[in-house]
Amino acid sequence: MTRLLPYPWLSLGLALTWLLLNAPLTPGSAVLALLVGLAVPAVMRALRPPAVRVRAPGTLVRLAGLVVYDMVRSNIDVARIILGLRRGERRTGFVTIPLDLRDPFGLAALSIILTGTPGTLWVQYDSQSGSLLLHVLDETGGDEWVRRVKGRYERPLMTIFS
């Protein structure tokens, strides 16, 4: 069974996503969903990704809530900047953040969080020094962004994945 379905949850998720994106349900879309659900995990098996171990599911839930809150708040802040409700206050810039997080899954999650949050963009990561270059729409100066990323996101991700 594991030869046909090496990653059953991935197969199910891909097939359901395919069906949702190609609504309404037709026989052709169902066949393609089945093919995608079987083919992509077979390719993943060839890549042999290491298993992900989430060590603190409660922290993961709290982090997810925090990220949703930050995204909503950031959407409002970016809308105010774009609509001109905060004139003269916008200063875009780059911030270098020294990261202690080294886990590849944690770094991937951090990149998704930062890039998915309006007003911030993960630009570059130097794996040797552990420094992250982040572009921010509203650069406030000082170490506020460093404290925000390290305290709000990096610390919980280290608890979850380390």
Image (spheres, rainbow, N blue to C red):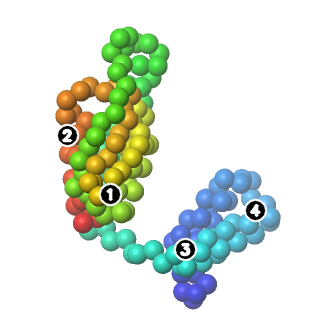
Q: Nearer the viewer, mark 3 or mark 4?
A: 3
Q: Mark 1 vs mark 4: which is more N-terminal?
A: 4
Residue 94 drawn at (x, y percent)? 34, 33
- Asked if residue 154 shows in the view, the reply is no
Q: Secondary structure at mark 2?
A: helix
Residue 103 drawn at (x, y percent)? 31, 64
Identify the residue position indicated by label 4 in the image.
Answer: 29
CB contact under 8 Å: marks 3 and 4: no
Q: Residue at x 37, y 25 (%)?
A: 92
Q: The disc labelled 3 sits on which kind of residue? A: Met
* Front-lying residue, 130 or 153: 130
Q: Mark 1 vs mark 3: which is more N-terminal?
A: 3
CB contact under 8 Å: marks 1 and 4: no
Q: Nearer the viewer, mark 1 or mark 3?
A: 1
Identify the residue position indicated by label 3 in the image.
Answer: 44
Report how far apart the C-alphas of labels 3 and 4 lie in the structure. Answer: 22 Å
Q: Mark 2 vs mark 3: which is more N-terminal?
A: 3
**Viewport quadrant of the N terminus:** bottom right
Residue 138, quarter of the rendered image: top left
